[in-house]
Amino acid sequence: MVRSFSSQNAPLSLLFSVLIILNIIICQTNASCNIKDKQILLSFKHGLTDSLGMLSTWSNKKDCCEWRGVHCNINGRVTNISLPCFTDDEIITENKKNKTHCLAGKFHLSIFELEFLNYLDLSNNDFNTIQLSLDCQTMSSVNTSYGSGNFSNVFHLDLSQNENLVINDLRWLLRLSSSLQFLNLNSVNLHKETHWLQLLNMFPSLSELYLSSCSLESVSMSLPYANFTSLEYLDLSENDLFYELPIWLFNLSGLSYLNLGGNSFHGQIPKTLMNLRKLDVLNLEDNKLSGTIPDWFGQLGGLEELDLSSNSFTSYIPITLGNLSSLVYLDVSTNHLNGSLPESLGNLTNLEKLGVYENSLSGVLSHKNFAKLPNLQWLSLGSPSFIFDFDPHWIPPFKLQNLDLQYANLKLVPWFYTQTSLTSLNITSSSFRNTSPKMFWSFVFNFSFLYLFNNSMSNVLLNSDFVWLVHNGLSGSLPRLTTNVSIFNINGNNMSGSLSHLLCHNIKEKSNLKYLSVIDNHLSGGLTECWGNWKSLIHISLGRNNLTGMIPHSMGSLSNLMSLHIYNTKLHGEIPVSLKNCQKLMIVNFRNNKLSGNIPNWIGKDMKVLQLRVNEFSGDIPLQICQLSSLFLLDLSYNRLTGTIPRCLPSITSMIFKNVSQDQGVLHIVDHDIGIIFVISLSLLAKGNDLTYDKYMHVVDLSNNQLSGRIPIEVFRLTALKSLNLSQNQLMGTIPKEIGNMKQLESLDLSNNTLSGEIPQTMSAITFLEVLNLSFNNLKGQIPLGTQLQSFTPLSYMGNPELCGTPLIEKCKKNEAPGEDTNVMAKEEEGSELMECFYMGMGVGFTTGFWIVFGTLLFKRTWRHAYFNFLYDVKDWFMSRWT
Ligand SMILES: *[C@@H]1O[C@H](CO)[C@@H](O)[C@H](O)[C@H]1NC(C)=O
Ligand SMILES: *[C@@H]1O[C@H](CO)[C@@H](O)[C@H](O)[C@H]1NC(C)=O
Ligand SMILES: *[C@@H]1O[C@H](CO)[C@@H](O)[C@H](O)[C@H]1NC(C)=O
Ligand SMILES: *[C@@H]1O[C@H](CO)[C@@H](O)[C@H](O)[C@H]1NC(C)=O
Ligand SMILES: *[C@@H]1O[C@H](CO)[C@@H](O)[C@H](O)[C@H]1NC(C)=O
Ligand SMILES: *[C@@H]1O[C@H](CO)[C@@H](O)[C@H](O)[C@H]1NC(C)=O
Ligand SMILES: *[C@@H]1O[C@H](CO)[C@@H](O)[C@H](O)[C@H]1NC(C)=O
Ligand SMILES: *[C@@H]1O[C@H](CO)[C@@H](O)[C@H](O)[C@H]1NC(C)=O
Ligand SMILES: *[C@@H]1O[C@H](CO)[C@@H](O)[C@H](O)[C@H]1NC(C)=O
Ligand SMILES: *[C@@H]1O[C@H](CO)[C@@H](O)[C@H](O)[C@H]1NC(C)=O
């Protein structure tokens, strides 16, 4: 039958077989997913957390080759899993990363049982642990015998930006050692994996290795043999690596990208670096490297980026750098270089970025240095000793976007006004006196970034997104702002007149101002009722001005406000009820005013810091305070508060449990719209020293009021407190033994009350205690012996006539009945002398202070670098000025 069919209908049979073949091909492309692979994927899914169902397609209903992020080969075997939670484009600001929808929880290594898997990208998710696979027993024993069993041959593995992922042991990776070419673990915590280098040295095919921001602490100086023969890209930036640059690195002759920036490497650049002939990018920024920049750098002819900034290099900039004709980016700023700017750099026609500021360079700078640099976009000069000798009619071939000048008189940079593409200007310690202010201000009107430091100008309409005019010696009345301004800081000038110049002029559109800071000026008058125009504000700081009047009702319209600082001014009256509408308020600092009335009982639940010290508040402490479960700093000292300390304080949970993330984090408020973090620093006076914290500092200070009654035992349940000050009140009762639970306490002041009874033995458990003051009470009996309580001076205990034992001079009488008088009289004279010292040392303990350091971190890409430097600068500056 077959025969007759084939002989009689040959064409038909041909068609038939073609159909069969076609059919087979179609079947093959549709080859359904391998059962085993499917099981592995399902068990991987089972192990992780996918709260919003991003992997909802991963179910039995669909062929696994069609599941989200899964790609198969022609045989239905899974080869590629690509499930990054964000792509680079989607991350507009790092801060906007909302990871609610990302894959989280356990990353199960069973996924590598997919025998054909070769590409795995789970970057930007939220995994937190690595779960060893089912055969984990074999896993740990195969630490050297990699490649055994049916393990996949992954060549591309990306787990980067899983910021909560902690990997303590990387040995499981060895199973991929023969295949892996690309490994990216940026921002994964590898703090505990001290053998990462020895381990990765066994990956002969690895060509790209990214371990930036992994909290790596050590890197071996020596490797017996550097195996990474294929390595082309190596990124170890932003770790905690120190020692000298490891020698083995310079055997990696195939490297084209090497980034060791943001570590603490010290020592000199070794000559062996010359082996890296293929280098395109070398970044050693922000280390502690010293010595000279070697002449032979000029032989690394392929270099496109060279960043040696923020180190301690000395001597001159080598002329030979002018030979690096491919150079696009050269940054040697913030070192100790001297000499002149080599003319040879003027031959680097590809140069787009040139940074030499913050060195001690000298010599003449003229158009000759820049005439052949048509591509220059980013120029940062600045040394007090540069002599400018530009042809006044010279028109540069470049159009700068960013210009950093330091110490430069604008008049000496005559081509400045030709730079119509500038968007960012940073002029530090420069002089504008000889330029026309009008021309200058209209020229900079549209710059997005204006950072003018130590200059003098005044009285204008400003339009830059970012206006930073700190300490410029500016005088006159406050400038007006257009709706484009989002950050305005004019701290430390001589501005006078009223806030109304700034706040009350007519603006038609909605303002975008987020951050307003006018600390340390001579502003006077009231706070105005114009706040309704500025609803976008999230931070206001008006400290240290001559402002008077009451807190205006219109401030209640600031519904976005998170942080409000009006301190060392002359305000009086009650806190208006309208502030109740500022529901986002987290940080309030009204210290050193004459505010009166009751402490408000409507304070928003999110309050973290409430500082009302040195005012005239009266009445009871409202019980509603206890509902502020996020509060960690409560400072009501130096007021006229009466009544008792509320028993409900332990409802303030943040004073009981130390939140680990808080503990490591800085106190900040975040603006998601422009992607900026404002870092708030606390200044606390401890042991006579100003200490600045931008960390969370748990403090209760109710001292210097008229509080009475017993100290409720509940107070001693606030176990997260670092400082407790109840001194100068009329408190009575005993110190309960529960005080021993306050293990975090560093400062305790209960002085000048009428506390009685003995000092409980449990107090010796408070091991971090540095400041103790129990003086002027009615405590009695022996100071607990054999504990650190003896390490304090008598000042800590004086004025308690019935207290005895070291460090006091009064010896305890054996079998002394409690409460019996000791011979106080004899000691009185010594006592009064001690007293004087005591008053002189009254600074002891945490008091005063609270101000703002403005900081911005990362996020908006174009701003990233600038802001980073900026944060540190400004912080240093504040610290040196105002501590
Ligand atoms: C894997 O899939 C991703 C996303 O589709 C793709 O970008 C990548 O190139 C693929 N990798 C391979 C090796 O096919
Ligand atoms: C994050 O996204 C989820 C849903 O995708 C949303 O419910 C949540 O409010 C967002 N959180 C923030 C802080 O934006
Ligand atoms: C391999 O693991 C075993 C057991 O965990 C251990 O004793 C051995 O030292 C390891 N070998 C290497 C080379 O790490
Ligand atoms: C490994 O692969 C071989 C051949 O492909 C197969 O016979 C064997 O069952 C696999 N072993 C495991 C544990 O999957
Ligand atoms: C270098 O890699 C090979 C395997 O590729 C390995 O056997 C050897 O131990 C490695 N050497 C060092 C020093 O790690
Ligand atoms: C570096 O290379 C030199 C010369 O090729 C060789 O002698 C030395 O052993 C290598 N060092 C390392 C750590 O690989
Ligand atoms: C710049 O390059 C030209 C031509 O290559 C060369 O003649 C000149 O000496 C170079 N100038 C400097 C300062 O190196
Ligand atoms: C505040 O005003 C008084 C007098 O009105 C003046 O003496 C004082 O210097 C002013 N303080 C500041 C900081 O401007
Ligand atoms: C204790 O406080 C009272 C008023 O509360 C005050 O008069 C006295 O001077 C204070 N004593 C010390 C030693 O500070
Ligand atoms: C402005 O320039 C100074 C020195 O020129 C530098 O220290 C500072 O970081 C720069 N600021 C910004 C925001 O770029």
Image: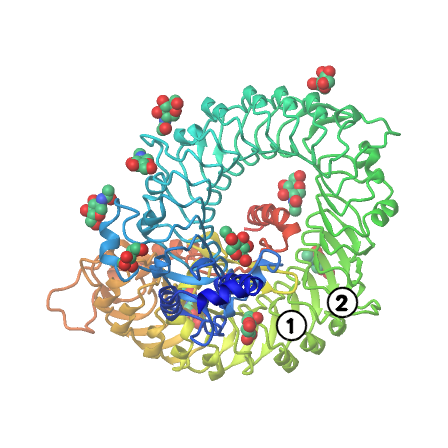
Q: What whole-number distance in Å separates the C-alpha atoms at marks 1 and 2? A: 13 Å
In front of the other: 647 or 446: 446
Type of amino acid at the residue the image marks with label 1: Asn
Q: Is residue 828 left or right of residue 462?
A: left
Quadrant for residue 550, please give it.
Answer: bottom right
Residue shown at the point (83%, 67%) measured from the top left = 505
Helix or strand or loop: what does disc 2 sit on?
Answer: loop
Q: Nearer the viewer, residue 338 or 238?
A: 238
Q: Label 2 is placed on what type of residue?
A: Ser
| Residue at screen point 80% across, 36% down | 410
Q: Which residue is mark 1?
A: 560
Judge by depth and name the residue closer to the eye, 780 or 313. Answer: 313
Q: x and y percent of residue 663 in the render?
A: 42, 61
Query: Which image quarter is the N terminus in?
Result: bottom left
Which mark, by number, is residue 763?
Answer: none
Do we see residue 575 in this rendering? yes
Q: Is residue 317 above or below residue 430?
A: above
x, y percent for residue 484: 77, 60
Reply above or below: 350 against 700. above
Which secondary structure, mark 1?
loop
Q: Which residue in the protein does label 2 denote?
A: 511
Place residue 374 in its image quadrant. top right
Please indicate whether residue 526 sits to the left or right of residue 215 in the image: right
Is 213 above or below relative to 24?
A: above
Q: Earlier in the sequence, mark 1 or mark 2?
A: 2
Q: Are marks 1 and 2 in contact (CB under 8 Å)?
A: no
- Above or below: residue 510 compared with residue 388: below
